Amino acid sequence: MKNLFLLFLTAISYQSSFSQVKNNINVIIPNCGIESQWTSIKNNISEEYKAIYQVKDYHEWDNFIIENFNPKKSTIPKFLIKGLNTNSLSSTTGKWINRMFFPGETMILTIYNQEDKNDHSSFYIYASGTVVKKKNNKFPFIEKIENYELKVTNTTSNISQTIMNTKTIPSWSAGGYEGGVFIYWIGDLNGDNKMDMLIGYSNHYAATETLLFLSNKNGKKLFNKYSVGGCSLD
């Protein structure tokens, strides 16, 4: 099991060509292909990690809490992060999505100012692309998704940014879309009252890269992109 954990740490440290910003940020998602090993893995996670727990099912300004990870706590966090300064935050707003975001889908997230709940901004998320169906109309019905694009717009500033753009997302041999563009969580992770996104990207069933899109503070674009780990889907 110790060797398994070392392999896991190697996987989450993997940096690829998708990363645009050099960083020391790492993310662990307990149910990202390693769910069965969580009991042993949690006891080896360093104290540097912050844990993000969902405390309310509905979207509100404080429906997630952020605290130092405690392996003795029975509640499993939605994800853990290290290398990002979250000391000023004890709670935040967000949504746990945890699924592939398909062409034609839309979503709105409102981010509340922690000091003034009447101050907020909304972000519109939408995906486009072409779903290519199987010619014989048999399972798994979908052959692939072409020209997939995931875009976010700040409805207050009207600034938009394409955060993912890929030519082809194939279906796996079992016919599912366990990979593709997978939104895990959206919310304010760095306390600047703007939206951040944690997503996965894969075009092969054997691996997923975890990407963190952190809000850009200079206002010229919405996000900076960070590669923060990996995930085996076996």
Image (cartoon, grey):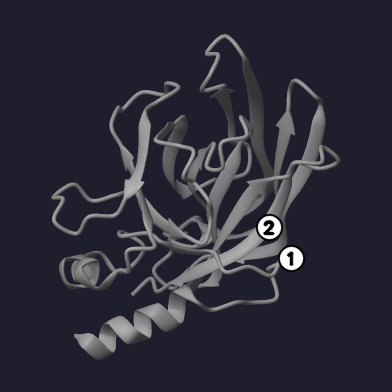
Callout 1–callout 2 Cβ contact below 8 Å: yes
SS for callout 1: loop
Q: Residues within 10 Å of mark 1 (few under 14, many from 20)?
A: few
| Residue 11 vertical placement versus 107 (above, below) | below
Which quadrant of the figure has residue 105? top right
Q: Quadrant of the C terminus?
A: bottom left
Residue positioned 72% across, 47% down in the render: 223
| Residue 123 vertical placement versus 228 (above, below) | above
- Residue 11 percent coordinates (x, y): 44, 79
For residue 65, say whether it is visible. yes
Given the image, on which type of amino acid does mark 2 rest? Answer: Lys
Residue positioned 16% across, 66% down in the render: 39
Q: Residues within 10 Å of mark 2 (few under 14, many from 20)?
A: many
Q: 48 and 150: which one is in front?
A: 48
Q: Quadrant of the N terminus?
A: bottom left
Residue positioned 17% across, 72% down in the render: 40
- Residue 130 percent coordinates (x, y): 69, 50
SS for callout 2: strand
Instruction: Choose the circle earlier in sequence order: 1 or 2.
Output: 1
Specify the label residue 20 is tagged with. 1
Q: Which residue is mark 2?
A: 225
- Residue 51 percent coordinates (x, y): 34, 50
Q: 113 and 17: which one is in front?
A: 113
For residue 134, say whether it is visible. no
View extreme (front): residue: 87
View extreme (right): residue: 220
Given the image, on which type of amino acid does mark 1 rest? Answer: Gln
- Residue 78 percent coordinates (x, y): 34, 48
Q: CA distance from mark 1 to mark 2?
A: 6 Å
Residue positioned 53% across, 19% down in the render: 115
View extreme (top): residue: 118
